Image (cartoon, rainbow, N blue to C red):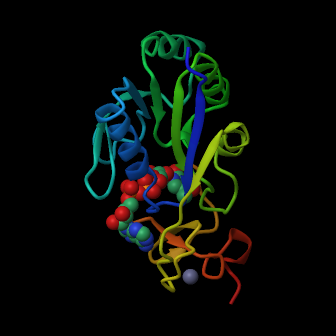
């Protein structure tokens, strides 16, 4: 049995997390002859239902699963991936707590688990269980985008925008794209407690 490994790709929106995950999986399939099984949260069907799609057009077939993982879903995933070498999860920030044990268990079973997800939500706080996943990772790829305000290459935050202005409150989960979100650097990011300050 192989050793198992956990790779976490993280960063703000538009930092090419999905592109990186797809590229890695495709290379493992094509050149490494590995069997890859990929999952995505069913709630995020912006680009396709049964594929992970990156903005520059990379695509990878994926199984949609609810973001609230139940014991039954976890058992099904362990069964579906029995003969897989690599198991990938896109948008991992959306899954509930069982994602941590699932990822750990798959790695103990000898799988290379590759996940990608947002580092922070629109408030600048840890998103879902990304922190726990980073803690258990064997390797981490931290990506940045270009800040939509000043053009700095250190866009590590994601600002939620409504009518052109940063928002102060709202649900943590709100599926959207460039109409509602933009990457920003620390200097340009406006955290909720500073939204109404001049
Ligand atoms: N501000 C930006 N900084 C970097 N890339 C951007 C920006 N806005 C749009 N893009 C495009 O988005 C692509 C990343 O898309 P994608 O892989 O879907 O990212 P993610 O999964 O991290 O949201 C980049 O390759 C680039 O073409
Ligand atoms: C910051 C933030 C984002 N989201 C949503 C918006 C998108 O649907 C996804 C992120 O997609 P990407 O592949 O990383 O571009 O997350 C959210 O629900 N809440 C937030 O705070
Ligand atoms: Zn900036």
194 lies above or below 97: below
Count the marks: how many? 0
Going by the image, does 31 lie left or right of 136?
left
Q: Residue at x 28, y 34 (%)?
A: 30
For this rendering, which residue is in front, 55 or 125? Answer: 55
Asked where in the image residue 24 lies, by quadrant, the reply is: top left
Q: Percent x, y for residue 187?
A: 65, 82
From the image, which quarter does the C terminus lie in? bottom right
At x 73%, y 41%, the residue is 135
Determine whether 114 is above or below 68 in the image: below
Q: Position of residue 160 (x, y in %)?
A: 53, 66
Asked if residue 25 shows in the view, the reply is yes
136 vs 13, left or right, is: right
Q: Quadrant of ligand 3?
A: bottom right
Q: Position of residue 110 (x, y in %)?
A: 57, 19
In the picture, the quarter occupied by the N terminus is top right
Q: Nearer the viewer, residue 114 or 149?
A: 114
Name the one closer to the observer, 38 or 71.
38
Q: Is residue 175 visible?
A: no
Q: Quadrant of residue 107?
A: top right
Residue sitting at 65 percent across and 25 percent down?
104
């Amino acid at each position: 049995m192989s050793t198992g490994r956990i790779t976490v790709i993280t960063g703000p929106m538009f930092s090419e997390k999905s592109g990186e995950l797809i590229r890695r999986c495709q290379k493992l399939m094509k050149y490494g002859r590995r069997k890859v099984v990929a999952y995505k949260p069913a709630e995020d069907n912006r680009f396709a239902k049964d594929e992970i799609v990156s903005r520059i057009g990379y695509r990878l077939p994926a199984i949609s699963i609810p973001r609230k993982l139940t014991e039954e879903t976890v058992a099904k995933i362990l069964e579906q991936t029995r003969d897989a070498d690599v198991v990938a999860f896109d948008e991992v920030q959306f899954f509930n707590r069982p994602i941590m044990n699932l990822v750990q268990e798959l790695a103990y079973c000898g799988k290379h688990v590759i996940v990608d997800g947002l580092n922070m939500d629109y408030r600048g706080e840890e998103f879902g269980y990304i922190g726990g996943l980073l803690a258990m990772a064997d390797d981490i790829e931290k990506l940045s985008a270009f800040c939509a305000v000043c053009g700095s290459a250190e866009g590590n935050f994601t600002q939620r925008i409504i009518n052109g202005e940063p928002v102060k409150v709202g649900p943590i989960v709100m599926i959207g794209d460039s109409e509602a979100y933009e990457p920003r650097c620390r200097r340009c990011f406006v955290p909720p407690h500073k939204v109404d300050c001049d």
